[in-house]
Amino acid sequence: MQTKQPIPFDPSPGLIGIPDSNIQRHLGLYHGYVKRFNYCREDMPSASACAKYGLLSQVNNECNGALLHELYFSQLISGGRASKNNAFWMFVEQAFGSVKAWQRNIIEICHTPGPGWAITYHVPYVGGMNSHVKGHSDGVIVGGEPLLVIDLWEHAYECYATKMEYVQALFANIDWNVIDVRVADT
Ligand SMILES: [Fe+2]
């Protein structure tokens, strides 16, 4: 069985408005998801039937926790970087009618209480869609390809007065070219 290795990215230091200490702690949590994902898979073959049921649910959670964090961290760059080809902006214009309409909708989703993620997806045969994932797994769209991924767990915004301050800081550090590549890969 293949062991998952953590991706060695480190968007800090220098994200604007996001303390390095916050990013370092957050990366530590990401490593925890990868570790527990591997533990679950190692334990599965020898687990009792009862333990296996628990592991089956946990392994999905740990896997999504790791993968969503990878999408999240890999889209960050200090001060953000403007799109060169506008692929994502053209995508949302088509899917939502305008960039403003997409933005209003994703911000509205960011207000959803409780831990989770706000995600803009490309969904085959549907087009663009913003959605909320509760936890790491509840509400993930089957076949949906995540384009922009926003962590809404408390650990992501604990150092801000409000969750929206964090979302604003996050938007100031997005490399839109990374998002454009995800659009091109759909
Ligand atoms: Fe997180």
Image (cartoon, grey):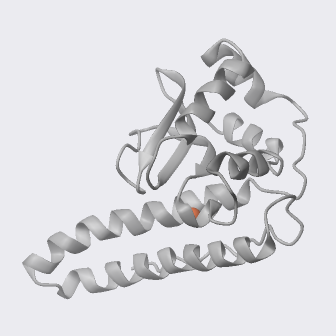
Q: Position of residue 49 (x, y in %)?
A: 8, 77
Q: Quadrant of the N terminus?
A: bottom left
Q: Is residue 163 above or below residue 65?
A: above
Instruction: Name the image quarter holding residue 21.
Output: bottom right
Name of the residue lying farthest toward the top: 97
Instruction: Name the image quarter holding residue 185.
Output: top right
Q: Is residue 58 above or below residue 110?
A: below
Name of the residue lying farthest toward the left: 49
Q: Position of residue 166 (x, y in %)?
A: 70, 53
**In percent of the image, x 47 and y 21: which residue is there?**
126
Q: Is residue 114 left or right of residue 170?
A: left
**In percent of the image, x 60 and y 76: which residue is there?**
6
Q: Nearer the viewer, residue 31 or 158?
A: 158
Quadrant of ligand 1: it is: bottom right
Q: Position of residue 80 (x, y in %)?
A: 87, 49
* Number of on-image labels: 0
Q: Is residue 57 left or right of residue 136?
A: left
Q: Is residue 53 above or below residue 32?
A: above
Q: Quadrant of the C terminus?
A: top right
**In percent of the image, x 37 and y 84: which residue is there?**
39
Q: Is residue 172 above or below residue 67?
A: above
Instruction: Name the image quarter holding residue 128.
Output: top right
Q: Is residue 14 left or right of residue 65?
A: right
**In percent of the image, x 82 and y 43: which residue is there?**
177
